[in-house]
Amino acid sequence: MRRALAGAVAVTLASAAIVVLPTAPTASAAESGTFTALTYNIAGLPEALSSAPTPRKSATTTIGQRLGPFDIVHVQEDFNYHAYLYAGDTTHAYRTPTSGGVPFGSGLNTLSNKPYDEDDFERVKWNDCDTNSGDCLTPKGFTFMRTRLAEGTYVDFYNLHADAGSNSGDLAARASNFAQLSSFIQSRSAGNAVVVMGDTNTRYTRTVDGTTIRDFAAVNGLTDPWVQLVRGGNAPAEGSDALVCDNANPTDACEVVDKIWYRGSRALTLNATSYKNNHAGFREDGTGKMLSDHFPLSVGFSWSTNPAYQFSEQFGGPHGDYFNDVDRVELGAQATEISLRSNARVDQVGVTLSNGTKLTHGGTGGSFSSLTLGSTEYVSSAYLCQAKHNNHTRVFYAKFTTNLGRTLAGGRTTSTCTTRTAPAGWQITGFTGRSGSEVDKIGFIYTPNRR
């Protein structure tokens, strides 16, 4: 796994020309923490096209200078003044590279105090846009990034900018946008905690839009902190009067088109603890004018890991379909068999649990081999090697070792290898990662050993 601005340190053994990646540190017990997230459309269209009330170069620099208090920042319309934003920000070590100004870029970027998996970062263009409001002039869409909170603990962050306008074509395009994002979340983030932030161009009160975002939240198990914390769990009725904000002095009670949703997972409890319209902190000195034509919204989050599960870091490349077994690994699960399909590379990994559940990932190529575990035996570690095949990084070799010293191995060793070891008293009972016809990336789910 490659983390943004945090390249892995490697030790080269000259005699064997082998690169040994650092062994992942032993996973710890349940962890917890907090972070703040901000979403802000910074009005980065060229000055002549911008509807913001302040000069774009100076305003964008000031915005960058004021992002420091927030751990993870999603910006939209970060187009032609991107350099001023990043020059103004001196706090966030992990920042996405720009995709370009108008008309080439999406305007979506993230500045973060926490590392993210560079390999899995994606920019996705909407399938549909309406020509009204200039939505088709730039490749608007969303980004996906997996942000690291602690060893083996990640949240999937989405940054979006949906179709603008309010005519029938806009409403239909926006509904398509959210359907596309929903399908992506179900594909990429099954079993994972999720935060979605951005300029949705929707309102709960607007007919059609209200249904669109209610359905989006419901099908993905997402909660809107504004609805939860400000409105006591009750979203405004669709078709009711818009809750318009006073630009000079907006309150948290007014509804804006910029929104945030979140969910936890079986492995990670995620709770919104605060919601705030941060308009007062993002105004021009002297005039009090808004630095953008949107308001910056923030949410404070608390998180804690489930003490019944621990996770390793993943190893391999950014290819294939995503998988996460955590929802199928029951509390107290014990492994009874480990299996591989392999030849030149690792084609498939598998584990059978004591309740009969079989978890397999990868294809059907290679030769099958398995190891049935004894009554006091469990898988305690895995030795993995990776390399490129057809320009895709894949898992070439895997060797599982039990507490009794027995092993199951397959594939070919390479010059880039690592070891994942279950914490003392824990065992490997499931997998996370990516696979297609072979295993591209793999991580491990640990549960307490009761044998």
Image (cartoon, rainbow, N blue to C red):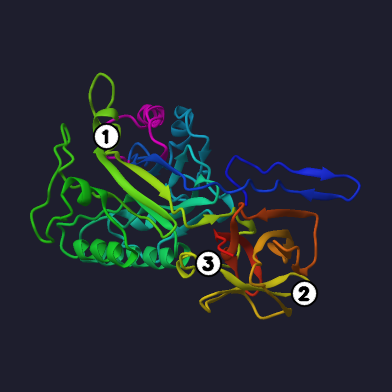
Q: Position of residue 379 (x, y in %)?
A: 66, 64
Marks 3 and 1, how far apart in space? Answer: 37 Å
Q: Position of residue 353 (x, y in %)?
A: 55, 73
Q: Earlier in the sequence, mark 1 or mark 2?
A: 1
The label number, if any, that marks residue 278 in the structure image: 1
| Element at label 1 | loop
Part of the protein shown in magenta? 49-72
Query: In terms of depth relative to the viewer, which is nearer, 279 or 190?
Result: 190
Residue 141 seen in this snapshot: no
Mark 3 residue crowding within 10 angstroms, few (<14) / some (14–19) / many (20+): many
Residue position for label 3: 323
| Element at label 2 | loop
Residue 434 seen in this snapshot: yes
Marks 2 and 3, how far apart in space? Answer: 22 Å
Q: Amino acid at mark 3?
A: Phe
Q: Amino acid at mark 1?
A: Asn
Query: Which residue sits at x=52%, y=35%?
Result: 93
**Residue 290: quarter of image:** top left
Residue position for label 2: 343
Mark 2 residue crowding within 10 angstroms, few (<14) / some (14–19) / many (20+): some
Q: Is residue 50 magenta?
A: yes
Total tally of numbered discs in the picture: 3
Q: Amino acid at mark 2?
A: Asn
